Image (cartoon, rainbow, N blue to C red):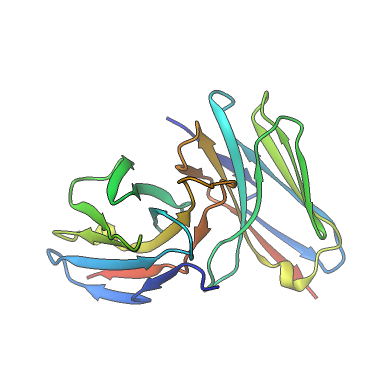
Amino acid sequence: ILNVEQSPQSLHVQEGDSTNFTCSFPSSNFYALHWYRWETAKSPEALFVMTLNGDEKKKGRISATLNTKEGYSYLYIKGSQPEDSATYLCAFERGATNKLIFGTGTLLAVQP
Amino acid sequence: DAGVTQSPTHLIKTRGQQVTLRCSPKSGHDTVSWYQQALGQGPQFIFQYYEEEERQRGNFPDRFSGHQFPNYSSELNVNALLLGDSALYLCASSLDGPGAITDTQYFGPGTRLTVL
């Protein structure tokens, strides 16, 4: 059984706060780790695809790190804004299969 | 450039009925995957189509079937609907054929299926 776990389940922060979430995944047969942002009533939006141990990616105020040996990835948001409010999903890809195994997501609410 | 589109947006069916959901992939993409998201869970992989064939399948019963057309669009069919089939069904497209340079899967907004 392949489990992808995300923590925390939900997070409430104030505008301007920096925050981070964790995604844990199996460390065997790793191919890629995907991060998505999903706003209510919209399509999940791809943020990052991470493939190399030690990889670090950045998109504006959002960045992510990857540790494939210990099986975790962190997503950081610097200076959270209300428009960052969404569910953040990570998905593990085992082998080059294009088959994604998702966690249950972290729901972020940013209060103005 | 149109992204992934899905139809219908919402659907209500009764137990035992059959349903067909449709997906048009992002322009230039040749691979379509389907996911089911039940309440409180992350999306779960149903199956994937490439070159009009089912390439791999998740842990879903045979009541779930699909099809991919020559223009790469896809359908998901569910027979003998159960209450537990109520969920959001997501379609994702990617490029897997010659020229593929990214593993990013692009998702549609989903079809919300309610089974009464």
The percent position of residue A76, horizontal first and vertical second, equals 78, 50
Residue in the picture at 32% in, 49% down: B51
The percent position of residue B100, horizontal first and vertical second, equals 54, 47
Residue in the picture at 36% in, 66% down: B23
Residue in the picture at 33% in, 76% down: B8
Q: Quadrant of residue B89?
A: bottom left
Q: Is residue B36 visible?
A: yes
Q: Is residue A16 above or below residue A30?
A: below
**Nearer-the-camera pick, B55 or A34:** B55
Q: Quadrant of residue A79?
A: bottom right
The percent position of residue B57, horizontal first and vertical second, equals 31, 41
Q: Is residue B40 visible?
A: no
Side of B51 relative to B108 (left or right): left
The percent position of residue A77, horizontal first and vertical second, equals 79, 56
Q: Is residue A110 above or below residue B34?
A: below
Of the 4 image quadrants, the one containing the C terminus of chain B is bottom left
Q: Is residue A87 above or below residue B57?
A: below
Of the 4 image quadrants, the one containing the N terminus of chain B is bottom right
Side of B43 relative to B15 (left or right): right
Q: Quadrant of residue A61?
A: bottom right
Side of B19 relative to B29 (left or right): left
Residue ranking furthest to the front: B98
Residue in the picture at 23% in, 52% down: B64
